[in-house]
Amino acid sequence: MIKMTISNCLVVIPAYNESDRIYKTLNSVSKDFSSVLVVNDASTDNTLEVVSSCKVTVLNHMINLGQGAAILTGIKYFLRFTSLEYVATFDADGQHLSHDCKRLYKYASSSKLDAVFGSRFTSSNNYTNIPKFRKLFLGAANIFERIIFKSYLQDSHNGMRVLSRKSAQQLLKIDSMKMAHASEIFTKLNLSGITVHEIPVDVRYDVRKSSAHYVTALNIVSDLWQRK
Amino acid sequence: MFVAKLFFGLFIGILFLLLFRLKFNDQIRIYEKLLALIFCVAALLFLSFPEILTFVAHLLGIGRGSDLVVYISIILLFWLVIRTHLRINKLEKDITIIVSEMALLNERVNLE
């Protein structure tokens, strides 16, 4: 395969205290994508210095707002300062693989789709990769969302997404994205009649303990309940 | 009994004065001041004439006047907690917008 950098897609990487992992992530992503944006969500370590040394655009939140808000800032940047066709979200911790994101983008742009999400569960070969308890946990979250949001996604809590300009504009209507941003993004797209497609991606669980704590899941549930 | 009455009476009186003298202006809205006024007057009234309270409690099917006071205060406190919660939520939303916009504004300065 010929290596080609994609220039029509902005990759937004929200980062909070990721100084030891983000350098590697940025290195691999910027090989595949020419425009990369890191939103530093007021990290308390030296994430900002590490990121500044790379050739990527950096936005800096003055106080910590959470991943959802960081993504939203990235999307605002995408809509206001760029004229690219697609925006992608990508986790900073090295769980995602850059070539997966590339595949998502290619799938979206070749079929002119508005939203393509990565999914851990449609890929059969890597299903066993996910820790048992996490699988159970995600399964429960999924059922909950199917009931509450009429979600049809296999895996709505994957951080890798590719969105068109049209989809990004829909997300601007979200006034606050706290912890429940994964469901929030899907719901907004769904309500505005945008079909979300899913493509299997690999997720590496060996890089570190995942940042999503099980206790926060309860917070998410109550958060969503309030909004209903 | 008299000492207790005197103590509570003074306490309510001071509370009332504080509420009215503090210059919160917009933060304590006028209807909240009115509510405080009604509350203080009622408290003083019930302190001096507990029979009224007992009478009202009986009307509502509650045995004692002091029980009525407890029930009402629980409801009031709940209302206050919910209101504060909503207000904090709104503030969080506003802060999110401001911080996000500031990040973007800095970027625009860099671009120019």
Image: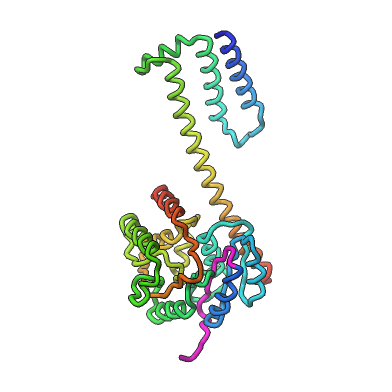
Q: Measuring from the top left, give residue B61's x and y in whole percent.
A: 34, 17
Identified at 47% across, 65% down, the residue is A169
Residue depicted at 45% across the width and 23% down the height: B70
- The magenta segment is A1-18
In the figure, is residue B62 to the left or right of A94? left
User: Does the magenta-highlighted stretch encompass residue A166?
Assistant: no
Q: Residue furthest bottom?
A: A2
Q: Position of residue B77 (x, y in %)?
A: 49, 31
- Is A154 above or below relative to A219? below
Question: In the picture provided, is A33 more to the left or to the right than B54?
Answer: right
Q: Is residue A185 above or below residue A6?
A: above
Q: Residue at x 40, y 82 (%)?
A: A110
Looking at the picture, how far across and down is residue A75, in whole percent?
52, 66
Q: Position of residue B54 (x, y in %)?
A: 42, 12
Residue A36 in view of the camera: yes
Q: Quadrant of the N terminus of chain A?
A: bottom left
